[in-house]
Structure formats: structure tokens, C-alpha cells
Image: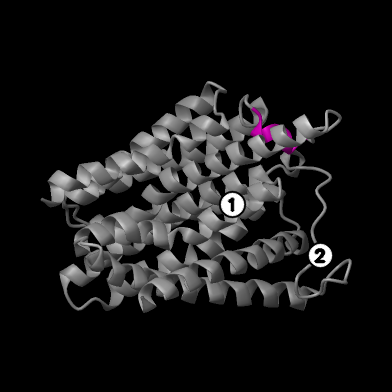
């Protein structure tokens, strides 16, 4: 019972911390004069991807056995899988829920009007052609990197560890591209909510913005770790093996901050930021943990890890096709979660 109570407490703590975090990170982007999309793809993604990256770093550098080091490899593969399926699926589900609420409001008040952000959740495509092109560009960056990442897990050669540095370089290029991106493509006329640390200040102090960002990140990090530990304890109680818990449930737990951020931003009507946070976190997960794994482990995949890689590529391929055809709707985005179900079903014969 204690594990279940702690699980709920951690989930609530992560959600509330994410609300304060997204509030702070938007002001941080304002202070650093970066584009609105870079707030999601770089600043927010860096913060929410920190827990998984630390898990990988600790596992691959301090693991006493190859099995212990492979925990980091599993984390590097599980993160992108959960983001490409569950995180996008939850975002699509939230958009569908928002659309239903707007329909109910419109039925109650025939004069209700829809704003530009609300149009993103319409029955048609998610945003304009430019919006979909922007989303597709992020996935186009991710997919080739991820394919190389999986391919390296199937071969062995002497200088493979050196390629870990190449993954860091790829993220550096992506980082520079996002920071230097065209600010004109960002949302205009979006007012920032008052900073939680200084709710009465029209323009909060920089120290308050930084302090709120760091404080919420610390809570998110420790609450996420505690959440994963409770999940590891509850899994066997529910009759799940350690392998199933590690491969099926732990990735969702470690990506909970990104999922919570998406829920909060969609609820606030900032759909572009929600999707940018997920795509930015995916780029970090495809490069930084992978680079660490290549440097400090043999980076060799078993059948379960290969299966997770294939499902991730299938999910991204599906999203790319719908984006490029300008047919990505909230419903089709929600379908991405189905790929995680397929992954779980495929694990049954693999782990048997």
C-alpha cells in the first residue's frame, strides 16, 4: 500500500512541478531571447530529458557488470520509444478532449469564437502547412539518427565507441539550428503568465526565473527517480517480471515529465510548445544517452531492444507520412499510442 501511495504522491508532485517548470522556462526563453519553438525543443526538452540522461550516465560509468551497464542502454532505447508513442498519443488525446469541450461550449453559446491556437485542435490537420512542415523537419532529424543508433547495436567493430562523439556533434548542430531559428515562424501575441515566484511582477527578476527553473527541475528529477523505484516494486506485486517492468513500464515513468508538460501546454492552448517539447526531447534521447552508451558499453542489442527500436521507427514513419500529407489530426496523433500496445504484445513471445 505504501508503494501505491508514494506512486500517486510522486505523480502529483511531477505534475505540479511541471506546471511551475513550464511557467519558468517560458520566461527563461524570454530572458535569453530565443524563439518560442526553441523554448520547447531546447530549453524545456533539456530539462525534462535530464532524468533519463542521468540514469544512462550513472549506469554506463559506474556499473560494475555488463548487465548493470546495459540498464543505461535500455534507458537510451526506452526513452525515444515512449516519446514517439505514448507522449504523442497523450497529446492527441488531450487535443480531442479539448475539442469536445469546445463543442460543448459552442453548443451552449452559439457566439463562441475559436482563436488561432484553438484551431490547432480542429478536426482538420494540426495547424497550417507551415506548422506541419516544421513538425516533419524535427522528425526528419530524428529518424536517420535513430536508424544509425539501432544499426550500431547490431554490429561490432573496434572503433565503434568513438562514434559516440559523433552523436554529441549531431545534437550540437541541432541545438545551434534551433537557437538560430527564424523567430518570425514563432507564435505571435502570446502573453506569458506571471512567474509563480513573483506573481505580482509584470516582468520578474532574472534570479527568480532561474531559481524557479532550477528548483522545479530538482523536484522533477527526484520525484521521477522515486516514481521509477515504486514502479519497480509494484511490478512484481502485479505479477509482472522484472524484464517486463523495465522494458514496458519504466520508459513511461522516465518520460512522465515530457508527458505532463504536453498535457499542461495543451490545456493552456499552446499546442506547438507541447509538440516541440516532445520532438526536442526525442532528439536529446537519440543522441546524448546513445553517445554515452557507445563510449562506455559494447552497445549490443538483444531481441527486446531491437524490437523497441523497430516499433519506434514504425511510429515515427507513421507520423512523418501523415505530416507530409498534411493529414495529421488529433485523432491520428492519438493513434501513435497504439504502437506502444503493439510493442507490449510483441514482448510476450520475446521474453517468454
Foreground pick, 192 / 65: 192
State which region is magenta: 116-122
Q: Write down the quadrant of residue 33 in the picture.
A: bottom right
Label 1 packing within 10 angstroms: few (<14), some (14-19), many (20+): many
Any mark on residue 194, and which? 2
Relative to 159, say whether 71 is above or below.
below
How far from the left and from the top, in percent, is residue 123? Answer: 62, 26
* Residue named by callout 1: 263
Relative to 26, say whether 59 is above or below.
below
Question: Would residue 18 appear left or right of 165 to someone viewing this image?
Answer: right
How far from the left and from the top, in percent, is residue 218? Answer: 55, 76
Question: Would residue 161 appear left or right of 319 to someone viewing this image?
Answer: left
- Give the spatial CA distance, label 1 vs label 2: 19 Å
Foreground pick, 203 / 331: 331
Q: State the SS at label 2.
A: loop
Which corner quadrant holds the N terminus?
bottom left
Amino acid at each position: 500500500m505504501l508503494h501505491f501511495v508514494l506512486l500517486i504522491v510522486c505523480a502529483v508532485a511531477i505534475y505540479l512541478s511541471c506546471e511551475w517548470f513550464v511557467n519558468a522556462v517560458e520566461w527563461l526563453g524570454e530572458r535569453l531571447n530565443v524563439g518560442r519553438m526553441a523554448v520547447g525543443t531546447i530549453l524545456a526538452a533539456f530539462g525534462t530529458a535530464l532524468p533519463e540522461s542521468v540514469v544512462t550516465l550513472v549506469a554506463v560509468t559506474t556499473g560494475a557488470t555488463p548487465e548493470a551497464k546495459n540498464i543505461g542502454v535500455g534507458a537510451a532505447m526506452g526513452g525515444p520509444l515512449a516519446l514517439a508513442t505514448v507522449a504523442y498519443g497523450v497529446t492527441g488525446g488531450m487535443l480531442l478532449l479539448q475539442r469536445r469541450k469546445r463543442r460543448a461550449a459552442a453548443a451552449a453559446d452559439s457566439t463562441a469564437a475559436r482563436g488561432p491556437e484553438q484551431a490547432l485542435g480542429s478536426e482538420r490537420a494540426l495547424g497550417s502547412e507551415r506548422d506541419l512542415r516544421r513538425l516533419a523537419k524535427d522528425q526528419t532529424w530524428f529518424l536517420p539518427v535513430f536508424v544509425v543508433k539501432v544499426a550500431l547495436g547490431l554490429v561490432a567493430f573496434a572503433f565503434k565507441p568513438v562514434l559516440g562523439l559523433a552523436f554529441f556533434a549531431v545534437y550540437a548542430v541541432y541545438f545551434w539550428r534551433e537557437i538560430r531559428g527564424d523567430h518570425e515562424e514563432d507564435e505571435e501575441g502570446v502573453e506569458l503568465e506571471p512567474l509563480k515566484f513573483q506573481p505580482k511582477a509584470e516582468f520578474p527578476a532574472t534570479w527568480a526565473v532561474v531559481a524557479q527553473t532550477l528548483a522545479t527541475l530538482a523536484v522533477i528529477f527526484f520525484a521521477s527517480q522515486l516514481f521509477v523505484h515504486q514502479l519497480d516494486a509494484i511490478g512484481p506485486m502485479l505479477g509482472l517480471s522484472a524484464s517486463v517492468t523495465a522494458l514496458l513500464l519504466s520508459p513511461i515513468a522516465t518520460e512522465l515529465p515530457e508527458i505532463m508538460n504536453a498535457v499542461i501546454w495543451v490545456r493552456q492552448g499552446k499546442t506547438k510548445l507541447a509538440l516541440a517539447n516532445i520532438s526536442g526531447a526525442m532528439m536529446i534521447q537519440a543522441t546524448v544517452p546513445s553517445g554515452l552508451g557507445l563510449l562506455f558499453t559494447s552497445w549490443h542489442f538483444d531481441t527486446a531492444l531491437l524490437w523497441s527500436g523497430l516499433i519506434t521507427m514504425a511510429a515515427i514513419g507513421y507520423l512523418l507520412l501523415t505530416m507530409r500529407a498534411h493529414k495529421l489530426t488529433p485523432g491520428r496523433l492519438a493513434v501513435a499510442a497504439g504502437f506502444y500496445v503493439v510493442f507490449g504484445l510483441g514482448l510476450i513471445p520475446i521474453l517468454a
